[in-house]
Image (cartoon, grey):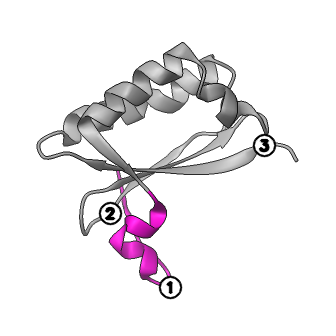
Amino acid sequence: MGTEICQAVYRPKPGKDDELAALIAGHVPMLQAEGLATDRAPIVMRSGKDGTFIEVFEWATEGAASQAHTNPEVQKIWGAMGEVADFLTLADVPEATDRFAHFGPA
């Protein structure tokens, strides 16, 4: 298997929308700089129902996601994200139950 497309789901904590948006904007560029994500531009969208962010990006290799869990730069940004957001699953987003889910741009 080659690269994998990943979706990450972040619900901002109260009053932390802007901080989370700034961290998301730097997330994939940092992964790319570390050789963990491809140059494919990420898609970042937002739930209109509860404000949850969904980030879609491509890991560079099959093992890149595992490598991210031991990379100090990744751990730093994920830690910062965890302070301003809850990490969820796609099933936690209200629109996920819609047959054709629609989201706004982030």
Q: Residue at x 31, y 47 (%)?
A: 86
Q: Secondary structure at mark 1?
A: loop
Q: What's the residue type where badge 1 is placed? A: Arg
The mark nearer the N terminus, 3 or 2, is: 3
> Label 3 crowding class (10 Å Cα cut-off): few <14, some 14-19, many 20+?
some
Q: Magenta residues? A: 89-106
Q: State the CA–CA distance, disc 3 to disc 2.
A: 27 Å
Q: What's the residue type where badge 2 is placed? A: Ser
Q: What's the residue type where badge 3 is placed? A: Thr
Residue identified by numbered label 1: 99
Q: State the CA–CA distance, disc 3 to disc 1.
A: 27 Å
What count of labels does the image hold?
A: 3
Residue identified by numbered label 2: 47
Residue identified by numbered label 3: 3
The mark nearer the N terminus, 3 or 1, is: 3
Q: Which is nearer the eye, 36 or 66?
A: 66
Q: Which is nearer the eye, 87 or 41?
A: 87
Q: Which is nearer the eye, 20 or 73?
A: 73
**Residue 54 part of the magenta-drawn span:** no
Location of residue 18 (image quadrant): top left
Q: Residue at x 33, y 26 (%)?
A: 80
**35 to 19, vertically: above or below:** above
Q: Is residue 83 left or right of residue 71?
A: left
Residue 33: percent from the left, percent from the top? Answer: 61, 17
Q: State the CA–CA distance, disc 2 to disc 1.
A: 15 Å
Q: Are marks 3 and 1 in contact (CB under 8 Å)?
A: no
